[in-house]
Amino acid sequence: MLPDILRHGTYEWEYHLYVPSFLEYYLSVFSKPVLEKITEINQKQFFHYSSGRSKPSKKTIEKIRNSIHHFASEMYSMHFV
């Protein structure tokens, strides 16, 4: 049963993912070469991030996020005939 405070109004969920978690899931969907093309980040760097050998900087995290959002926006706007 939901608390009263959650029964009123509209809510949005916001997900925060660690880069390794994102890569662990999406490397089963997209290959490293595809992610490299989308984000312009070297495949070897993705390997280091996904294995935990290195952590991306805040700037790199933003670049990944912005690139993925841009790609998703392009996909969302497509219409097929």
Image: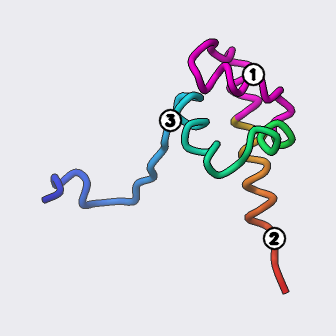
| Most foreground residue, 3 or 68 | 68
Distance Cα–Cα, label 1 vs label 2: 30 Å
- The magenta region covers 39-64
Secondary structure of residue under mark 1: helix
- The reply to whether discs 3 and 1 touch (Cβ–Cβ < 8 Å) is no
**For residue 47: magenta?**
yes
Near mark 2 (Cα within 10 A), the count class, few <14, some 14-19 or many ≥20, is: few
| Most foreground residue, 51 or 58 | 51
| Most foreground residue, 63 or 35 | 35
| Three-letter amino acid code of the residue under disc 2 | Met
Q: Position of residue 48 (x, y in %)?
A: 67, 19
Q: Which residue is mark 2?
A: 78
Distance Cα–Cα, label 3 vs label 2: 26 Å
Residue at the (77%, 23%) spot, across then down: 44
| Three-letter amino acid code of the residue under disc 3 | His
Of circles 1 and 2, the one toward us is: 1
